[in-house]
């Protein structure tokens, strides 16, 4: 089931939507200023019927179909409306011709925005009956809007990547709304789709004229001399006036996962803090969710321990040699970067910004759970049962601590981790890693400003 919307086009939309969009626009995606309307929540991509917005309802006609996403309010009276995949009706369809099939829901034909599920289904069925030649177009729109989301291993990977991007946005202090706008970047049957990062399905990166910003997002801290981009970055701000910028990079098929044993890397330049998260899937077993630890998991844990041990050694060396540039009174609750998230295996959900239910654990805490007697499986393996974990950080607590710089590296261990990331983000290897770089000259939060 997809969301259905009725969009009464502005004069500019009537003029521009039928035109062939520029080739560089992904799937003809265009943004228009649209009269503000409180769309029914959640705000998601909708299959849309566009009308000519005639002054008299009785003469109003559907002139095209496509998909839309309602952006945030851009002024007192307008909001941004993203449109894509627009198809012009060769023979416009008067709204009054649909009233009989709509029944009691005919009143929605005078409204605009997202319809109720029942009214949306009736409108879609009514248009299909009146214009059977549109069935193929409507089928394609329904598929692109999540009627058939990616499943299997591809869907699982996309779910974890989406969760990592959402966690970065939450830790950054921004809304997760962009996740709702995700669309398959390639065709449903394209074999390359299993290797395309989640980030590629988000709305295209806006054009940036400031060359210094371009230089920044094309490079990583400590990498000024060489490009590190193989897949497009996305840049987010908390709001239009915010000095805080989040650079997100979906480093798919690189060595970062195999070198560091992580899936998500959060870099806060102002706090000189880096935190890394390794995702571990829990599978449902009866009524419980269970993580099964194997040889691969043990090797990843060993790699994370090696990174943590080196960070401690760097901090101790800086302290004893009095070379630390970290200001006194700037503590960390966890001074090492490596964290683990035990998360449930859930289907990939399009048009949703929700994070995956799960538990964040420090690497040491994760190791202790594996050493408890109750972690012994019936066949000799190691496992962690979700209900048996006494304490953990949930999504909200973890992202709050991350945002305020209470978790992650500090001082000289920062330099070590950045060098390691630089080495890891090189082409030629498998893996799926999401990197977020928080850049600002302003303290991230929960800090006293002199």
Image (cartoon, helix red, strand yellow):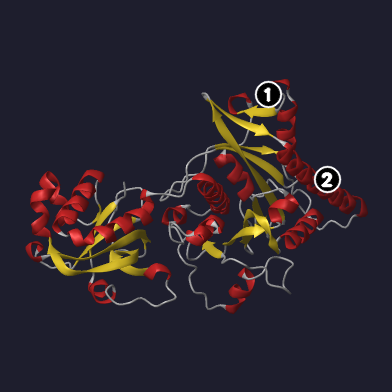
Residue 312 visible within the image: yes
The answer to which image quadrant residue 416 occupies is bottom right
Q: How far is the residue under mark 2 from the one under mark 1?
A: 29 Å
323 to 211, vertically: above or below = above
Residue 32 locus on image (x, y percent): 33, 69
Question: On the picture, is 61 further left or further right than 180?
Answer: left
Up the image or down, 382 lies above or below 175; here it is above
**CB-based contact (under 8 Å), mark 2 and mark 1:** no
Identify the image quadrant of residue 304: top right
Residue 50 position within the rendered picture, expressed as x and y whole percent measured from the top left:
23, 64
Horizontal relation, residue 60 to residue 74: left or right: left
Q: Nearer the viewer, residue 79 or 252?
A: 252
Image quadrant assignment for residue 11: bottom left
Q: Tell me the mark number nearer the camera, choosing from 2 and 1.
A: 1
| Lower position in the chain sequence, tag 2 or tag 1 | 2
Which residue in the structure is indicated by mark 1? 377
On the question of residue 44 being in view, the answer is no
Left or right of residue 250: residue 364: right
Q: Position of residue 440 (x, y in %)?
A: 62, 63
Whether 415 is drawn above or below 388: the answer is below
Secondary structure under the numbered disc 1 in the rendered image:
loop
Q: Residue at x 58, y 40 (%)?
A: 397
The C terminus: image quadrant:
bottom right
Q: Is residue 70 left or right of 334 when viewed as pictured?
A: left
Say few, some or many: other residues with alpha carbon within 10 Å of mark 2 (under 14 / 14 to 19 / 20 or more): few
- For the image shown, how many numbered marks are present on the structure? 2
Q: Report the front residue among 307 and 407.
A: 307
Q: State the residue in front, 161 or 91.
A: 91
Residue 315 on image: x %, y %: 84, 50
Callout 1: 10 Å neighbours few (<14), some, many (20+)? few
| Residue under numbered circle 2 | 309
């Amino acid at each position: 089931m997809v969301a259905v919307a009725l969009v009464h086009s502005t004069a500019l939309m009537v003029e521009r939507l039928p035109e062939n969009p520029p080739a560089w626009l992904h799937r003809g995606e265009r943004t228009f200023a649209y009269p503000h309307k409180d769309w029914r929540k959640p705000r998601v991509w909708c299959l849309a019927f566009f009308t000519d917005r005639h002054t008299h309802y009785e003469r109003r006609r559907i002139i095209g179909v496509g998909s839309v996403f309602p952006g945030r309010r851009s002024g007192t009276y307008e909001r941004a409306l993203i449109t894509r995949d627009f198809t012009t009706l060769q023979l416009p369809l008067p709204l009054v011709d649909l009233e009989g099939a709509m029944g009691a829901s005919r009143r929605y034909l005078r409204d605009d925005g997202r319809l109720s599920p029942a009214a949306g289904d009736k409108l879609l069925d009514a248009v299909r009956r009146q214009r059977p030649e549109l069935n193929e177009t409507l089928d394609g729109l329904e598929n692109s809007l999540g009627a058939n989301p990616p499943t299997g291993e591809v869907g699982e990977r996309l779910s974890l990547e989406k969760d990592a991007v959402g966690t970065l946005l939450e830790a950054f202090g921004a809304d997760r709304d962009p996740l709702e706008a995700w669309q398959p970047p390639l065709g449903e049957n394209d074999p390359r789709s299993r290797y395309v990062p989640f980030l590629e399905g988000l709305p295209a990166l806006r054009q940036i004229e400031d060359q210094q910003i371009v230089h920044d997002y094309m490079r990583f801290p400590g990498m000024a001399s060489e490009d590190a981009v193989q897949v497009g970055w996305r840049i987010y701000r908390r709001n239009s006036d915010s000095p805080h910028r989040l650079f997100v990079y979906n480093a798919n098929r690189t060595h970062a996962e195999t070198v560091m044993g992580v899936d998500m890397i959060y870099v806060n330049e102002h706090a000189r803090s880096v935190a890394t998260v390794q995702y571990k899937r829990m599978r449902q077993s009866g009524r419980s969710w269970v993580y099964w630890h194997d040889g691969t998991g043990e090797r990843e844990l060993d790699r994370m321990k090696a990174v943590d041990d080196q960070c401690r050694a760097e901090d101790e060396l800086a302290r004893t040699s009095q070379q630390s540039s970290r200001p006194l009174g700037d503590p960390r609750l966890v001074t090492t970067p490596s964290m683990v998230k035990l998360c449930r295996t859930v289907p990939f959900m399009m048009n949703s910004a929700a994070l995956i239910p799960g538990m964040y654990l420090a690497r040491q805490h994760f190791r202790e759970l594996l050493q408890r007697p109750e972690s012994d499986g019936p066949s000799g393996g190691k496992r962690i049962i979700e209900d048996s974990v006494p304490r953990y950080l949930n999504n909200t607590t973890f992202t709050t601590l991350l945002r305020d710089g209470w978790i992650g590296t500090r001082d000289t261990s920062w330099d070590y981790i950045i060098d390691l990331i630089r080495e890891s983000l090189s082409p030629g290897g498998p893996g799926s890693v999401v990197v977020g770089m928080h850049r600002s000259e302003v303290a991230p939060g929960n800090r006293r400003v002199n």
